[in-house]
Amino acid sequence: SGGNKRKLSTGIALIGEPAVIFLDEPSTGMDPVARRLLWDTVARARESGKAIVITSHSMEECEALCTRLAIMVQGQFKCLGSPQHLKSKFGSGYSLQAKVRSEGKQDALEEFKAFVDLTFPGSILEDEHQDMVHYHLPGCDLSWAKVFGILEKAKEKYGVDDYSVSQISLEQVFLSFAHLQPPTTEDGR
């Protein structure tokens, strides 16, 4: 299988103890357990002082393995830094996920959505499923404490059972750069 070929290729790359190791999409096609084992092996090689260059479309893989990463668009580097640096610099705002209790109240979810739109101007509803909503809250002037304070005060009023606020993911940073790439035509140009 493709996953076994990748495991073999990675093993061959590591076996000679080279100072620099190049890996192209090393965990593509692997099951989650094999992927974790591969990542642990690559991390041990990195910790032993090896320089490892990885190409990957998996932001999860990049966060697990990379101390520095670059995002390329049309063959040009658009940014370079640690995963945390890139999220802080290019990932403005927060991700909000909330579960709203709707028993006995028909419009509970709609009221909460109106509250979010009013309280966090420019917020974008990314996803809605049953009683769950996922928002992107833009804005550099919002602190974690302020966002949590606002949501804690609103929990009872809007019937919020549970919520989480997190920093924008590395994948969202990657996608914001990927949108800079012009669409290709059918012939690939």
Image (tube, rainbow, N blue to C red):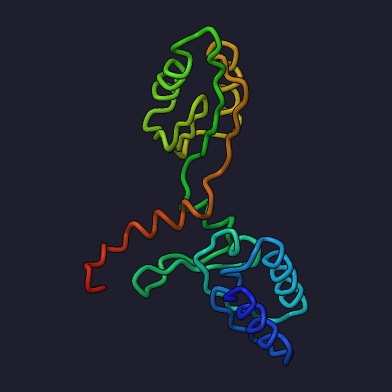
Task: Judge by depth and name the residue closer to the eye, 11 or 2.
Answer: 2
65 in relation to 102, above or below:
below
In this rendering, the count of numbered labels is 0
Q: Position of residue 134 (x, y in %)?
A: 49, 34
Q: Residue at x 39, y 21 (%)?
A: 118
Q: Position of residue 96 (x, y in %)?
A: 52, 34
Q: Residue at x 39, y 59 (%)?
A: 177
Q: Quadrant of residue 7?
A: bottom right
Q: Position of residue 130 (x, y in %)?
A: 49, 26
83 in relation to 45, above or below:
above
Q: Position of residue 112 (x, y in %)?
A: 47, 19
Q: Residue at x 66, y 87 (%)?
A: 13
173 in relation to 130, above or below:
below
152 in relation to 186, above or below:
above
Q: Quadrant of residue 63?
A: bottom right
Residue situated furthest front in the rendering: 1
